[in-house]
Amino acid sequence: VQLQASGGGLVQAGGSLRLSCAASGSIFSINDMGWYRQPPGEQRELVATATKRGLTRYDASVKGRFTISRDNAKNTVYLQMKSLNPEDTAVYYCAARSGGTIVPPPKSAARYDYWGQGTLVTVSS
């Protein structure tokens, strides 16, 4: 499975961005697809994840501002980000997990099998 993320960039505080991540290869095995981020000097953390059937999980810091969605026909996951603030500055990574459904979707990055290359989101104050 290969994951190709896009959509990062520079935005002012209060602005919006949408990230996309397209999966290719042995996609039949994928269940969860999600987004992690790694701020400068910090560990990678879950932003949001969604199961194939649409069950979602968000980090508390982004609830109400970010929305994850999937287009299973296109094998693509999106992250719509609104009301961005400088604390959202990070490299954002797309991730995918194969296997059966787990409720709620796992939070630990170690549970995810495939990773995209990362896309930088910079929010200026």
Image (spheres, rainbow, N blue to C red):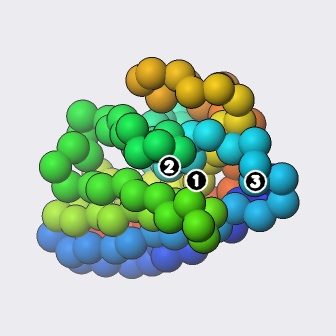
Amino acid on which the number 3 mark rests in the picture: Ile
At which x and y percent is residue 91?
53, 57
Q: Nearer the viewer, mark 3 or mark 2?
A: 3
Q: Which of marks 1 and 3 is in front?
A: 3
Amino acid on which the number 2 mark rests in the picture: Trp
Q: If you read the primary sequence from the N terminus, does the residue marked by circle 1 or circle 3 appear first?
A: 3
At which x and y percent is residue 22?
64, 67
Mark 2, Cα crowd under 10 Å, few <14 / some 14-19 / many 20+, is many
Could you give the CA–CA distance between mark 2 and mark 1, rounded to whole angstroms? Answer: 6 Å
Mark 1, Cα crowd under 10 Å, few <14 / some 14-19 / many 20+, is many
Q: If you read the primary sequence from the N terminus, does the residue marked by circle 2 or circle 1 appear first?
A: 2
Q: Residue at x 62, y 47 (%)?
A: 95
Q: Quadrant of residue 99?
A: top right
The residue under label 1 is 93
Residue 86 visible in the displayed image: no
User: Is residue 118 left or right of 60 when viewed as pictured?
Assistant: right
Relative depth, front residue between 36 and 75: 75
User: Is residue 23 left or right of 93 when viewed as pictured?
Assistant: right
* In the image, farthest residue toward the top: 103
Do labels 2 and 1 touch, CB within 8 Å? yes
The residue under label 3 is 27
The residue under label 2 is 35
| Helix, strand or loop status at disc 2 | strand
